Image: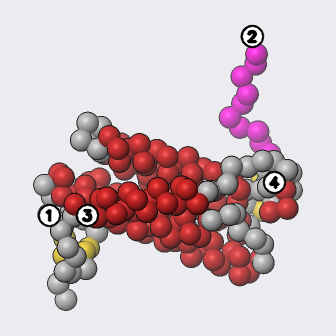
Amino acid sequence: MTEKSKVYTKGGDRGETGLVGGTRVSKSDQRIDLYGEVDELNSWVGVVVSHLDNKLFINEIESLKTIQNLLFDLGSNLACEAEKRKAFKLPAIKEKSISNIELAIDRLDSECPKLTNFILPGGGAAASFLHLSRTVCRKVERKLIQYQKTTGEELPENSVKFINRLSDFFFVLSRYVNLKMGESEVLWKP
């Protein structure tokens, strides 16, 4: 019988953590903050899945689970030094994944009423959590751009495009979920 690995290693007890390639960095490093935000986004997507009816939203749940895997792929790439990503054969975000998100956006949007007002976050619980996912996604996007500008490090392939499209997906899916659940959208009324 193989020995089970421990959850804790004590390696970070002095405020440092290891990157995939072995470099030790401070837990306050901009890179750690960035992939921590990706991890938070992934957790919010998990919350959304837990609030969706698994009979009514079969396709959407599958899409969200695929997105969770893609977010984990992105996080693993961000946790690795750019020059070592190919050596570790980390999974990249492919154009096909982005195209699939675009197709899902178009399909869901075609069923939603035409937008005539700005929409405030709200409606049912799942839609509200999708809005939280959207805002965290936008935060990830800002931090990705900031990271690239301040470090000059090459970002993982298609990462900005993926995150940009993903926030649109969360917005449209929130509208679709409210529609299917019979929840009213909360309109901005200035």
Q: Is residue 38 visible?
A: no
What type is the residue that disc 2 sits on?
Answer: Met
Mark 3 touches mark 4? (CB < 8 Å): no
Q: Position of residue 42 (x, y in %)?
A: 51, 52
Q: CA distance from mark 2 to mark 1?
A: 55 Å
* 89, 122: nearer the viewer: 89
Q: Residues within 10 Å of mark 4 (few under 14, many from 20)?
A: few
Marks 4 and 2, how far apart at CA = 34 Å
Crowding near pointer 1: few (<14 within 10 Å), some, many (20+)?
A: few
- Give the mark, 4 or 2, whose residue is nearer the N terminus: 2
The chief SS type of the magenta part is: loop
State the SS at label 2. loop
Kindly identify the residue that appears in the image at 29 percent across and 59 percent down.
108
Element under disc 3: helix
Amino acid identity at mark 1: Ser
Give the residue displayed 58% in from the left and 60% down from the top: 95
Disc 4 marks which residue? 86
Kind of residue sitting beneath label 3: Ser
Question: Which region of the structure is painted magenta?
Answer: 1-16
List the residue tagged with mark 3: 110
**Image coords of residue 146 (percent x, y):** 65, 78
Quickly name the residue at label 1.
184
Using the image, tell me which numbered label, if any, was put on residue 1: 2
Measured in 3D between alpha carbons, the distance from the residue under mark 3 to the one under mark 4, in whole angstroms, is 39 Å
Q: Earlier in the sequence, mark 3 or mark 4?
A: 4
Which mark's residue is nearer the viewer, 4 or 1? 4
Chain-order first, disc 2 or disc 3: 2
How far apart marks 4 and 1 lie (CA) works out to 47 Å
